[in-house]
Image: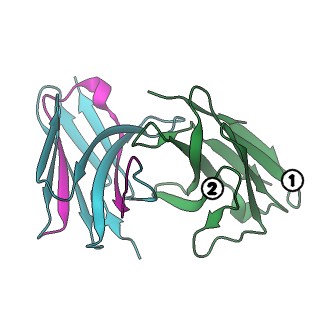
Chain colours: A green, B cyan
Amino acid sequence: GAVVSQHPSRVICKSGTSVKIECRSLDFQATTMFWYRQFPKQSLMLMATSNEGSKATYEQGVEKDKFLINHASLTLSTLTVTSAHPEDSSFYICSAEGSSYNEQFFGPGTRLTVL
Amino acid sequence: DQQVKQNSPSLSVQEGRISILNCDYTNSMFDYFLWYKKYPAEGPTFLISISSIKDKNEDGRFTVFLNKSAKHLSLHIVPSQPGDSAVYFCAASENAGGTSYGKLTFGQGTILTVHP
């Protein structure tokens, strides 16, 4: 199957700072990337969908000014958590979908802890 | 509003026996259902899917059954192996088109433990 990587795998930051998480499709071109958030013992909640070269579509209740998504190329999407607060601490997972595949390939996730 | 629910947080099974993981949904517009497996510190990996026009799909040891009238699906693993121990997520998509499943709605997951 196709490989999706995320960087960093774990990040700890101070409250009020911004954190950028990268999601890369390593061996295929991702026409669409998805960003999910998972709280402990809960399901993955879709935050936004991004298509290369266009603005992301955010799910209801997700603040677009707080969670900035950039999908500048067919292999890279970034999620920037701006002015992070402790309640933003969570596990963030991206997935990528290519034109040749009918499934989403998930990255390993990024554990964000905001102190 | 949880549109996809996995009501059993955990399941413990003996090696060689059958594992049955259940999932219920409320949105009748879902037209594809998928099962993912997740190990700690890794992203979910796709296992098997089923279209809403079918009631069964089989792939090796994994079979997914869909009961549309009951809005219920289940994943059967037989025989279960210790390596199957992981978190299993049920997911559903609406208006999947072409080569894309599109937006997925996930259940809460069920932790499967297969004992040797």
Q: Chain of mark 1?
A: A
- Which of these two is toward me, B38 or B93? B93
Indicate the quadrant containing the C terminus of chain A: top left, top right, bottom left or bottom right. bottom right
Taking the image as shown, residue A79 lies to the left or right of residue A2, namely: right
Query: Whole-percent x and y of residue A49?
Result: 59, 58
Residue density around tag 1, few if under 14, some if 14–19, many if 20 or more, within 10 Å: some
Q: Chain of mark 2?
A: A
Span colored in magenta = B70-99
- Which of these two is toward me, B77 or A24? A24
- Residue at mark 1: A14
Asked whether the viewer can see residue A94, the reply is no
Residue B98 among those drawn in magenta? yes
- Which of these two is toward me, B70 or B6? B70
- Residue sitting at 11 percent across and 48 percent down? B56
Three-letter residue code for mark 2? Ser
User: Nearer the observer, disc 2 or disc 1?
Assistant: 2
Q: CA distance from mark 2 to mark 1?
A: 27 Å
Query: Whole-percent x and y of residue B108?
Result: 39, 57
In the picture, residue A82 is in which quadrant?
bottom right
Residue B57 among those drawn in magenta? no
Three-letter residue code for mark 1? Lys
Query: Whole-percent x and y of residue A110?
Result: 65, 42
Q: Disc 2, disc 1: CB below 8 Å?
A: no
- Residue at mark 2: A50
N-terminal of the pair, mark 2 or mark 1, is 1
In the picture, residue A21 is in which quadrant?
top right
Instruction: Provide the secondary structure element on which disc 2 rests.
Output: strand
Taking the image as shown, residue A115 lies to the left or right of residue A17, namely: left
- Residue sitting at 17 percent across and 28 percent down? B60
Residue density around tag 2, few if under 14, some if 14–19, many if 20 or more, within 10 Å: many
Taking the image as shown, residue A63 lies to the left or right of residue B69, namely: right
